[in-house]
Image (cartoon, grey):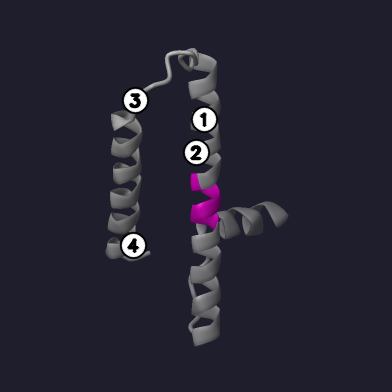
Amino acid sequence: MQLITIAGVLLYCGVLYLRYRSQKRNQNQPRRGAVGKLKMAKILGAALLVWLSVGYALQHLNESLDGTAAEPSLMERAVTFLSK
């Protein structure tokens, strides 16, 4: 993944966070508790894992289409070792 892509995603998330923090809160809504924050963290963590796995799969596919023999990843080496 290129540095410009990561920088763009970080900038986008930063702007969203700043817009969220600057908006006025509705006083009728209760504040989000620790359980809600933990649930949101789990969702964001799962989304990050999905993003990384899709990026890895696309990178692996790109190397296969180029015809270059890519060295096996850590997971592929572990599966090969365990299957023996």
Earlier in the chain: of badge 3 and badge 2, it is 3
Q: Position of residue 24 (x, y in %)?
A: 34, 25
The disc, 4 or 3, on the residue closer to the chain's N-terminal end is: 4
> Residue, x 28% and y 50% (percent of image)?
11
Q: Are marks 1 and 3 in contact (CB under 8 Å)?
A: no
Amino acid beneath label 1: Met
Q: Residue at x 55, y 74 (%)?
A: 61
- Tell me the element at label 1: helix
The amino acid at mark 2 is: Leu
Say few, some or many: other residues with alpha carbon within 10 Å of mark 4 (under 14 / 14 to 19 / 20 or more).
few
Marks 4 and 3, Cα distance to the nearest angstrom?
31 Å
The x and y percentages for residue 14 are 29, 43
Give the alpha-carbon distance from disc 3 to disc 2, as whole Å: 24 Å
* Viewport quadrant of the N terminus: bottom left
Q: Secondary structure at mark 2?
A: helix
Q: Which residue is mark 3?
A: 24
How many angstroms separate mark 4 from mark 2 (CA)? 18 Å
Asked if the residues shown at circle 1 and circle 4 are in contact, with their CB atoms under 8 angstroms apart, the answer is no
The residue where tag 1 is placed is 40
C-alpha gap between disc 1 and disc 3:
21 Å
Q: Which residues are magenta?
A: 48-53
Of helix, strand and loop, which one carries label 4?
helix
Q: Are marks 4 and 2 in contact (CB under 8 Å)?
A: no
Residue for badge 2: 44
- Quadrant of res 80: bottom right
Is 37 part of what is drawn in magenta? no
Label for residue 30? none
Q: Mark 3, residues whose alpha carbon is within 10 Å: few (<14), some, or many (≥20)?
A: few
